[in-house]
Image (tube, coloured by chain):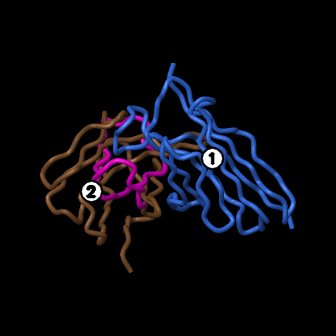
Amino acid sequence: SQKIEQNSEALNIQEGKTATLTCNYTNYSPAYLQWYRQDPGRGPVFLLLIRENEKEKRKERLKVTFDTTLKQSLFHITASQPADSATYLCALDVTGGSYIPTFGRGTSLIVHP
Amino acid sequence: DGGITQSPKYLFRKEGQNVTLSCEQNLNHDAMYWYRQDPGQGLRLIYYSQIVNDFQKGDIAEGYSVSREKKESFPLTVTSAQKNPTAFYLCASSILGTDQPQHFGDGTRLSIL
């Protein structure tokens, strides 16, 4: 079956460390993948987009990689801060060109001071 | 500031009652969407619209209805036919086109009395 997998267990790390979140997918060939941040009781906020022909994208302390062979995207937050604590969602187009992404369940990140 | 406004933030429905959730955007986006989010679940697409007076069913449209009479507005009605309406409802908008990020409102939490 087709699915998007994000670790359902919360990721706990110490402030200052690099957080790495994983998004795996099966049976898709997405043209792009997006990452969003969602705080409790709020709507998701778009962070980064990476396209199928891009290996890596950076924005400030954020870095996203996209490996279409492994069918995996990694989302890194360097020098993490307690304010980075949130749920992070990946989203991708399951039909390879759709403008409506399909969202994963998200992974909760908790950064301890 | 441009953005998406959802109201009310909390809504309670009695058995057999229809309720309408409001979504307004001033981003001049053509596309608008409604998602449902349950605890531990990804966002599931209910309805979407690419243009005024036109909309399409998403993955879980049964028990819901929408209208798109104005570009700025995309209200969602949760009908009495929706037997399990308790959830967090999110409205989003985007520029029409592949890989465009979605801009979300802050959601409406619907509960059953």
Under mark 1, the amino acid is Thr
Quadrant containing the C terminus of chain A in the rendered view: bottom right
Crowd tier of the residue under label 1, counting other residues whose Cα lies within 10 Å: few below 14, some 14–19, many 20 or above: some
User: Going 33% across and 51% down the picture, which residue do you hit?
Assistant: B33
Stretch of the chain drawn in magenta:
B74-103
**Chain B appears what colour?**
brown
**Residue nearest the viewer, comparing B100 with A87:** B100
As drawn, is A72 to the left or to the right of B52? right
Name the mark on residue A65: 1
Q: Residue at x 31, y 36 (%)?
A: B61
Rendered blue, the chain in question is: A
Q: Quadrant of residue B75?
A: bottom left
Residue linked to disc 2: B75
Label 2 residue SS? loop
Where does the image place residue A42, in percent across and percent down from the top left? 53, 62
> Which amino acid lies under the numbered mark 2 shown in the image of this protein?
Pro
Q: Chain of mark 2?
A: B
Left or right of B89: which side holds B96?
A: left
Main SS, magenta region, reads loop
